[in-house]
Amino acid sequence: MSRLAKKGVMNIEPYQPGKPIDEVKREFLLDEVYKLASNENPLGPSPKAVTAIKKTLKDLNRYPDGDCYYLKVKLAKKLKVKPDNLTFGNGSDELIAVIVQAFMNEDENAIVADPTFLEYRLIVEAYGRQVMVVPSLNLKYDLDGMRKAINEKTKLVFIANPDNPTGTYISDKEIRKFLEGIPENVIVVMDEAYYDFVDAKDYPDTIRYLNDRNLIILRTFSKAYGLAGLRVGYALSNAELIDCMNRVRQPFNVNSLAQVAALASLDDAAYLKKTREAVLKGKKFLYGALDKMGAAYVPSQTNFILVDVKRDGWELFQKMLKRGVIVRDMKPYKLDSYIRVTIGTDKENRRFIEALKKALKE
Ligand SMILES: Cc1ncc(COP(=O)(O)O)c(C=O)c1O
């Protein structure tokens, strides 16, 4: 009963994930449905991950390694950091919650942009902490505005770089200037979920700043590594902040299949290369097709594109569902005339364009 909910819980808008394929098949009596709604990797997981999972199935009676030892050591080597600069989560979503639990006192606030990934706000609010929202300018983070919004009660600033749902990014120069102006008692959370897709030359290598600032970088195996269903992400920070996070996270938060799959995926450079190439090729195709249609879109550094359909995006989203293409409705982000589409395989991209053309004419 809602009256039993903690203060503030009933004011939280539940997160609306992308619609699952089976649900759309059931609802619209369709055999073929293409999901381009959750920025997943359309190539499936790495075959090396699948092999590692199969080998581990017989050990499912055991608890997972609570320290993610092998994954941590391997990743630390790859990223040229120390193992104690890393901790893992049940997706980077969980790490956002761990950060809020570990660092935010009751009377402290977190600064978030608008639009940006909605989970920052939802999680901070779920823990009963205050969120301060700084509107973006032309769909790009207003870093000056965010710095000015910091007050004596600010503990966290969340930055998605590149941003979801816009696909825009912040350059190294902009980040450096921003970090220089951040007070010592504020932690900047730099969410780099789409890191592997970026091709902008001036995108920051934020690991360089790990030891000079209170900075936590979040990355995930859900996107470029194709393991969204297993839930594994990681945080990179200085050893002290990582230690604080380890104290509040659940001891077995990353399951054993996720650990071996992530470990094996790190060895599959060919898969990552193929994924990146597919996204860049798909992006080029979609830009070209959208240009031909005269459709407006936001240039993206990610595996998705925000398209301005210049009409009610939710209605268009419904019309596309009927045609078996699931995109993301942007109403929860208050981007009413937009839809967001994940870059898929060649076939999926073509199906998206066909469905979009038809839905726009309807
Ligand atoms: C910016 C951003 N951060 C984090 C996540 C969550 O990723 P994970 O699957 O690791 O929880 C997403 C997923 O869509 C995202 O877009």
Image (cartoon, grey):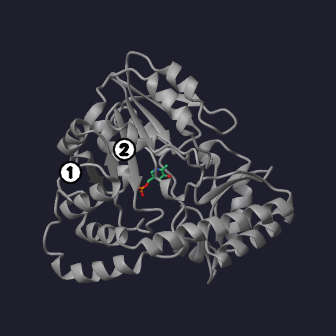
- What residue is at 34 percent from the left and 38 percent from the top? 210
User: In percent of the image, x 28 and y 57: which residue is there?
Assistant: 77
Q: Amino acid at mark 2?
A: Ile
> Image check: 150 left or right of 57?
right
**Foreground: 195 or 258?**
195
Residue beneath disc 1: 250
Image position of 59 with respect to 284: above or below: below
The answer to whether residue 139 is above or below residue 182 is: below
The amino acid beneath tag 1 is Gln
Tag shown at residue 96: 2
The answer as to whether callout 2 falls within 8 Å of ligand 1 is yes
Residue 262 seen in this snapshot: yes
Which image quarter holds the N terminus? top left
Check disc 2 and report its element: helix, strand or loop: helix
Number of marks drawn? 2
Residue 348 as seen in the image, left or right of residue 362: left
- Distance of mark 2 from mark 1, alpha carbons? 13 Å
Element type at marker 1? loop
> Pointer 2 and pointer 1: residues touching (CB < 8 Å)?
no
The label shown at residue 285 is none
Residue located 67% across and 79% down the image: 347
Q: Residue furthest left?
A: 62
Q: Position of residue 100 (x, y in %)?
A: 33, 37
The spot of residue 273 in percent (x, y) is 50, 70
